[in-house]
Amino acid sequence: MSAASLDLKRSLSANGVDDDKDSKKARLERFVADQQLLGSQSVPTPHTPHVIQTTRLPDALRKKILVTGGAGFVGSHLVDLLMSQGHEVVVLDNFFTGRKANVEHWLHHPNFSLVRHDVTQPILLEVDQIYHLACPASPPHYQYNPVKTIKTSTMGTINMLGLAKRVKARILLASTSEIYGDPTVHPQPESYWGNVNTIGPRACYDEGKRVAETMMYAYKNQNGVSIRIARIFNTFGPRMHPNDGRVVSNFIIQALQNKDITIYGDGTQTRSFQYVSDLVNGLHALMNGEYDLPVNIGNPDEYSIKDFAIKIREMTQSKSQIIFMPKVADDPSQREPDITVARRELNWEPKVSVEEGLRNTIDYFRGEVEAAGEIVPTGPDAVKPKGAA
């Protein structure tokens, strides 16, 4: 081989090494940039197509927060808020009614962890705050396995209180307006003790939450656990389970498919509906405030069920007929929160109108119906959730 050929070979070899080094360096830089991007936002998914930015908090300000039931309807929206603030979030869910699709946009993020676990079993974690939301909240779902519903409210709450006691974390219980039963006082203030049938079909949920509240104060008074209790009124919004059998989801799904809108009873019973973002803001304000007595979180804007059905039919431009079916046992005749305490102690009140919230929710369910082809709404009878995970 000539000297010129040898010089050319050495030159090509050296350039090849340099090119290889440059390529590796470029790939490494792209990888680092991708990781930094993934650590600063959510990833768009079919279920959550919009991007949620996350704040970068210093270690001294970043909390480690546990959300039980965090893959559920309300829990996943709470997770979005906490992640956007830059906290480290651990979601605990057994996916009975929760759906992985509700949180999959966070699965890549270094601040997010998802644990498949049932709260009726103890778990050891190190956390600063606990939002205890785990429990089916739809009557058909919590009546499907009433013993398990009671265990979730009792054993699950004991396990979370034990964890809070051990690690000195503050714990917030997602209680419910159902603890007021079929109220004889209207609207319902936190001082009202309720009118509940202890052996009726809804008792597994109503009484389970009532005893959970009792346990919260027992741990506070005996063990000094820092507690918060939110009594949540009817809530709606995107990520509601399509088959949860509640008024908002059923009416919208029926209207979008031009099927009969079914009302159980004569439609004169009333409900108050709040949009999910208002609830999440209320829970966050309660957790991080100083008030530790129960607080109603709900929208006092009250509708009769019949008027609400008419409103949804109009907003969806549906051809559905409204039909009336026999009344469900122990269905409350009226429900409206007195939110005086929330206004005074949390500086909180709902911001999103029912109409604005319904527009967002109708858009969400329109996508769910298109993706599924057809959705058959759940009736009032006990039933296992469909396609939960």
Image (tube, helix red, strand yellow):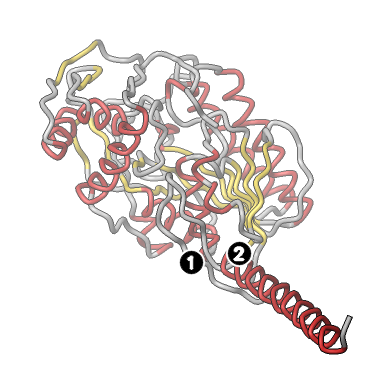
Amino acid on which the number 1 mark rests in the picture: Gln
Category of crowding for the residue at label 1, using alpha-carbon neighbours closer than 10 angstroms: few (below 14), some (14–19), many (at least 20): some
Residue at the location (49% across, 26% down)?
387
Q: Residue furthest top?
A: 326
Q: Are marks 1 and 2 in contact (CB under 8 Å)?
A: no
Camera-side residue of 24 and 193: 24
Q: Is residue 72 left or right of residue 118?
A: left
Residue at the location (72% across, 78% down)?
19
Amino acid on which the number 2 mark rests in the picture: His
Give the total number of marks visible in the rendering: 2
Position in image of residue 162 (x %, y %)? 74, 44
The answer to whether 258 is drawn above or below residue 70 in the figure is above
The answer to whether 18 is drawn above or below residue 333 in the figure is below
Category of crowding for the residue at label 2, using alpha-carbon neighbours closer than 10 angstroms: few (below 14), some (14–19), many (at least 20): many
Camera-side residue of 241 and 220: 241
Q: Is residue 222 left or right of residue 55?
A: right
Residue at the location (36% across, 24% down)?
245
Q: Which residue is mark 2?
A: 87
Badge 1 element: loop
Badge 2 element: loop
Position in image of residue 368 (x %, y %)? 35, 35
Q: Quadrant of the N terminus?
A: bottom right
Q: Which residue is mark 1?
A: 53
Camera-side residue of 298 and 78: 78
Corner quadrant of residue 36: bottom right
Position in image of residue 326 (x %, y %)? 25, 10
